[in-house]
Amino acid sequence: MRVLLAAILMAFGAAQAAAETFALGKYGKFELYPVGDWKIQVEDVGDLKVTFTPKTAGVNAVAQMTIAAGGADEFPTLEKLQAEIVSVGERMIAGGQFVESSPKLKMFYPKQGFGSYFVLTDPRLVGKEPVPGDFKTVTVGMIRASDKIVIRVQILSDGETTDGFQQLAGMVEGMELTAK
């Protein structure tokens, strides 16, 4: 039994060591636990811009998260956050580039806060084989992690059922906010 417990604790420690940490100044830090084989690039542009690109050939997905800390609490409720997301989706659909006629909201289930997203489909690629770098769907969403932290998410992939999308969405939902 002790050997099993030691193995579990060592595995947990290895998983913890693999976390990517993003400092948010006086607002704390985020820890991201990578799933799959992704290159993660972080750029401070006032907000933190985190870009995910696959290291593995055959994974046709990329993502970008923008973590804004310290602003006004514009989305204190799920309803206000979802209204903003719907507004973004309607503007995107108005351009006539997607199959959908309205954004269908889905839920993010983050460890802290709440969030939603929608997925839009490129009509040129429906029913066709995936082409590297040409994505069938765009996913746009937001997470309100706290009253001071909002995360905007964009995932380009070949759909919600692909491994690339599942890994990226899992990393977004699995992020942990640690207050200072």
Image (cartoon, helix red, strand yellow):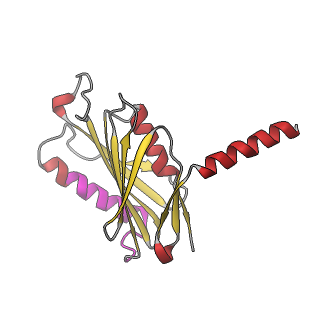
Q: Is residue 105 visible to us here?
A: no
Q: Which image quadrant for residue 56? A: top left
Front-most of 45 and 71? 45
Q: Is residue 49 above or below residue 46?
A: above
Image x and y of residue 139, in percent: 31, 45
Magenta stretch mostly in which secondary structure?
helix
Q: Is residue 68 above or below residue 142?
A: below
Q: Is residue 34 above or below residue 115?
A: above
Image x and y of residue 133, in percent: 24, 35
Image x and y of residue 44, in percent: 35, 66
Residue sitting farthest toward the left? 95
Quadrant location, the C terminus: bottom right
Q: Is residue 39 visible to us here?
A: yes
Give the residue drawn at x 17%, y 32%. 123
Image x and y of residue 176, in percent: 55, 58
Front-most of 166 and 18? 18
Residue range corresponding to the magenta coloring: 72-90
Give the residue drawn at x 52%, y 71%. 28
Give the residue drawn at x 43%, y 49%. 107
Q: Is residue 65 magenta?
A: no
Front-most of 117 and 52? 52
Q: Is residue 8 above or below residue 113?
A: above
Give the residue drawn at x 49%, y 77%. 26
Quadrant location, the N terminus: top right
Q: On the rendered structure, is 109 left or right of 142?
A: right
Q: Which image quadrant for residue 42? A: bottom left
Q: Report the label total.
A: 0
Q: Is residue 79 magenta?
A: yes
